[in-house]
Image (cartoon, grey):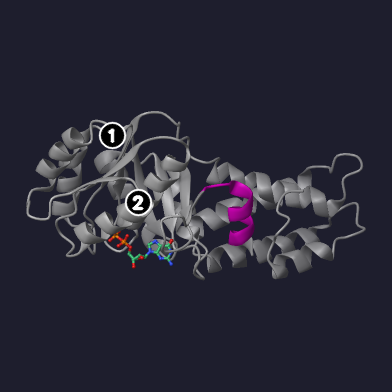
Amino acid sequence: MVLDNLGSSLRGTMDKLRGKSRLDEEDVQEIVKEIQRSLLQADVEVDLVMDLSSNIEERALNEEPPGGTSARDHILKIVYEEMVEVVGDSTEIPLEPQTIMLAGLQGSGKTTTAAKMAWWFSTKGLRPAVIQTDTFRPGAYEQAKQMCENAEVQFYGDPDAEDPVQIARDGMEATEDADIRIVDTAGRHALEADLIEEIEEIERAVAPDRNLLVLDAAIGQGAKAQAREFDSAVGVDGVAITKLDGTAKGGGALTAVNETDSSIAFLGTGETVQDIERFEPNGFISRLLG
Ligand code: GDP
């Protein structure tokens, strides 16, 4: 059954439908309101919430449940399908040689995610390397190096160099033996022009196969502008959401994937290199609606 770990509030509303074979307008409205409330609380953007809920409402009122399906299971299926329509399946990450560049604001969790992804690829039998180009944030070099040691993966960085683009170039050369290169980039506190310019230059230097936008689960409404900006600069192929072990639900990711027409690749669920999961829609959607 889809959405089997729904949060208690929506589940309660759904459970009131047990035994019903048809939904009346009042039932549908109550459920749609509940869904709107959950999604807004999870920081999904208002327009997106409205689009989603009107699609759900229309289908729930107009589509007949297939024979033998209860009203409750029917609307759950509609909710799930409409949410999947936006969230999509997990970003395709083939287990083959490739370069992946990470983008995002400072503190979003890029460096941590770079090391986690390298660890994840290493568990798939590949030889990953992390290239650290963040010369902006003090401590980024040491942090990345330490995490890569913990993950037992190759690391390239240069604490004395000042030009991130040159580090990226040198890093590509120095990690020739690796089959997966994960390029960490500098973030800033906001989307300043020099950040965008720098990431465009690094992108040209490393020619990544895919770019992932790293977003803190708590990003909320700020996700839209960020996603748009990075997408127009370098193209966003997928999103990594971090800090899902906290209380934030990660609704900003939904906004970001909708804005960039991409999907979610990885979830970060803690501070150690093993705290990473591939995205899977069912659990994430249940959490958003919880
Ligand atoms: P960057 O500036 O984007 O490179 O961000 P960092 O990788 O340095 O992460 C910023 C902070 O968030 C650090 O203290 C990390 O330990 C923490 N962090 C990153 N990912 C996660 C996560 O999935 N869960 C938790 N609890 N903390 C995380």
- Side of 103 where 86 appears, left or right: right
Q: Is residue 242 magenta?
A: no
Span highlighted in magenta in the image: 278-288
- Residue at (20% x, 35% y) in the render: 172
Amino acid marked by disc 1 = Pro
Q: Which of 275/88 is in front?
A: 275
Q: Please state which amino acid type lies under the numbered disc 2.
A: Ala
The residue lying toward the viewer, choosing from 84 and 37, is: 84
Respond yes or no on whether mark 2 lies under 8 Å from ligand 1.
Answer: no
How many discs appear?
A: 2
Whether the residue under disc 1 has CB within 8 Å of ligand 1: no
The C terminus - image quarter:
bottom right
State the residue position of label 2.
115
Across and down, in percent, residue 39 comes to 57, 62
Report the front residue among 277 and 30: 277
Quadrant of residue 121 in the image?
top left
Above or below residue 36? Residue 2 is: above
| Position of residue 78 measured from the top left corner of the image (x, y, whole percent) | 71, 47
Q: Secondary structure at mark 1?
A: loop
Nearer the camera: disc 1 or disc 2: 2
Residue at (67% x, 48% y) in the render: 80
| Labels 1 & 2 near each other (Cβ < 8 A) | no
Q: Given the current orientation, which residue lies at the most extreme top position?
A: 96
Q: Which mark is residue 208?
A: 1
Mark seen at residue 159: none
Q: Is residue 107 above or below residue 174?
A: below
